[in-house]
Image (spheres, rainbow, N blue to C red):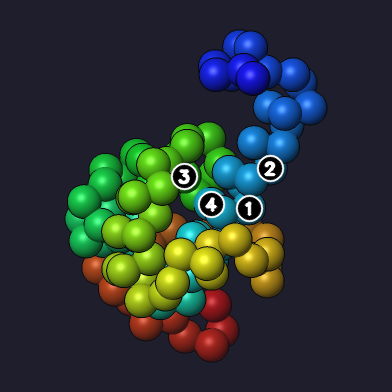
Amino acid sequence: MPTRPSQSSEAQLLRWQRRRELIGARIRELRLEQGLSQESLALESGLSRNMIIGIEWGRKSVAYERLWDIAEVLGVGVDVFISEPTSGPQHRVHRGGRNPMSPSD
């Protein structure tokens, strides 16, 4: 049983990457639905903004305990992160706290 990414097969690394992308996209989707900036999610969850960015784009792994912190801020259960996102990644820039998004967004 491999314990490090360097000891894992290419197929396993791809599965892990896909899982990170799935959970990250779902977190991003939920954050945007609530009009919450990455900075605000970071501050409220106790993570850095860079960590939130890395999680949302599937580049960073996150300790499962931290998923509960993110879920609490978003007002959802952690099981929601495992479901497929309903939309693909969208590039919107919003700086500040919570921002009610207009229907035209």
- Disc 1 to disc 2: CB gap under 8 Å: yes
Residue 92 shows in the view: no
Q: Is residue 67 above or below residue 29?
A: above
Q: Is residue 104 above or below residue 72?
A: below
Q: Within 10 Å of the Cα at label 1, are there few (<14), some (14-19), or many (20+) other Cα atoms?
A: many
| Secondary element at image label 1 | helix
Q: Is residue 97 left or right of residue 57?
A: left
Q: Percent position (x, y) of residue 44?
A: 21, 61
Quarter location, residue 84: bottom right
- Disc 4 to disc 3: CB gap under 8 Å: yes
Q: CA distance from mark 2 to mark 3?
A: 12 Å
Q: Which residue is mark 1?
A: 22
Quick one: which residue is furthest to the right in this view?
11
Q: Which residue is mark 2?
A: 18
Q: Is residue 11 left or right of residue 16?
A: right
Q: Percent position (x, y) of residue 65?
A: 34, 50
Q: Which residue is mark 4?
A: 24
Q: CA distance from mark 1 to mark 3?
A: 10 Å
Quarter location, residue 26: bottom right
Ranked by sequence position, the earlier of labels 4 and 2 is 2
Rendered residue at 48%/76% (across/down): 33
Q: CA distance from mark 4 to mark 1?
A: 5 Å
Rendered residue at 74%/19% (across/down): 9
Q: Is residue 19 above or below residue 82?
A: above
- Disc 4 to disc 1: CB gap under 8 Å: yes
Amino acid identity at mark 3? Ile
Q: CA distance from mark 4 to mark 3?
A: 5 Å
Q: Within 10 Å of the Cα at label 3, are there few (<14), some (14-19), or many (20+) other Cα atoms?
A: many
Amino acid identity at mark 4? Gly
